[in-house]
Amino acid sequence: MKIAIIDDQQDIRYSLSKILQRHNHKTVQFTGLEFDITNSIEEQNIDLLIVDVMLTDTLTGIDLIKSFKKKGLNLPIILMTAYTTPENMIEASKIGIKDILQKPFDESQLMEIVNKFVTVPSQKEVLSVGLHVEQKNEFVGSFETMKEIYHKIGIAANNNLAVLIYGQTGTGKELIASLIHKNSDRPNEPFIAINCASIPKELFESQLFGHEKGSFTSAEKQHIGYAEQAKGGTLFLDEIGELDSQLQSKLLRFLETKQFRRVGGNKEIGFEGRIISATNVDLKEKSRSGAFREDLYFRLSILSITMPTLAQRIQDIPILCEYFINKANKELQTKITGISREACNAIKKQPWEGNIRELRNVIYSACLNARDTILTKEDMRLNSLDNTNNTDEKLQKIIKTLLLQNDIMQAGEMKAKFDAIFLSTCFKLCPNISQLAAALQIARNTLKKQLTHFKIK
């Protein structure tokens, strides 16, 4: 295979050439500033490009690749970078680059990516490029965690697809929706977020589509709904899995026709925006059981993005701790300079049911309560993990305590006490009512009544 290496540093070009030649590949070297470089690449029948993201102060590898594509050169490309920022990773995805080689790398890492193209030397892919907007709110994580997510964000931003984001509470679903919006060709249009679980069933249609004056008893004036407020921007439907079955039908019609009527109105209003939805439940499974319309599920999930839990991102914890400490210093005027290794290791052992949001809150609290400029394990106030081997012993202690408190305790009283302990523990671990109700397989209203009954706040 004939491979072109484009990098402004001679030593990098030389090293890459030596490695590739050892694996029986032919190489050609460019700095990126050559006159008519596109024709030179075409004339030499290059099969694969390896391009550095930073060429000069005024020219980036992404700029160069864009110029190649404008001139019709559509070769497979590996982008090399030491700067894996959200901006360049999303932009790379938007112009069709699937493979990013992070510096520094070794021979095995290079050849693992290059070998993908040995069996498919004719692989070519082109994606259209939208307007890039500087991203201020980053989704923080390691390269391995982020590369697939940013790749999908790039695809979504480049198209008007309906996107469904899966993820537990606190994993950053709305932030991903916002990143798609800001990197699309409509970043200056409104981004309207709706929590489907928080709007009463009888008000949902009015909130989403609006209503006319006098359409119902309390409609004293015309109301413009969320869909109309979004204009040509993005309508983000969070907790879509909680939507009532009757409302699912109305939402499906809206998605199919891209039109709606205000409640009490007779005029069809067109919707020119895009729909992004999010859920913390398995909609595919809900659709199979009949709890969620299958046709609506397919409409919403043309492209799916699954957010990893913090437990699946243990390698990101040091990065996240540093990020949240810096944010706390700016927002809370604290002066924390670091975190102890012991504290960081203790954080890694926590369950983090609340995911990134829970970790952020713990770090913020620790920064405010720290005794020194270095966060310690004591500052974090972490709950030690229960050892599963001690479960029986702990249960026995609870029973013994209850029996000592009341020698003649009735079975019903015992059960009530255990119900209260069980529900209180569940709610501490999972404070999201919708998610907890789904996990316990009970209705949200039933769960809320039980929490009230046992005085659990």
Image: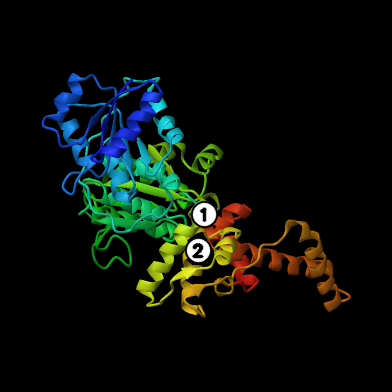
Closer to us: 110 or 356: 110
Q: What is the secondary structure assignment of the residue under circle 2?
A: helix
Up-down: is 284 above or below 84?
above
Amino acid of disc 2: Leu
Task: State whether residue 101 appears in this view.
Answer: yes
> Which of the 4 image quarters holds residue 118?
top left
**Circles 2 and 1: CB distance less than 8 Å?**
yes
Task: State whether residue 160 appears in this view.
Answer: no
> At 45% across and 59% down in the image, what residue appears?
320
Image coordinates of residue 284 in percent, x first then y, are: 50, 39
Q: Which mark is residue 362?
A: none
Q: Is residue 135 left or right of residue 296?
A: left
Closer to us: 276 or 75: 75
Image coordinates of residue 247 in percent, x first then y, are: 41, 49
Q: What is the secondary structure assignment of the residue under circle 1?
A: helix
Image coordinates of residue 333 in percent, x first then y, are: 37, 77
Up-down: is 188 above or below 410?
above
> At 38% across and 30% down in the image, what residue appears?
19
* Mark 2 burial class by Cα count in 10 Å: few <14, some 14-19, many 20+: many
Q: Which residue has dot 2 on it? A: 359
- Which residue is the extreme one toward the left? 35
* Mark 1 burial class by Cα count in 10 Å: few <14, some 14-19, many 20+: many
Q: Quadrant for the C terminus, please.
A: bottom right
Q: Is residue 441 left or right of residue 85?
A: right
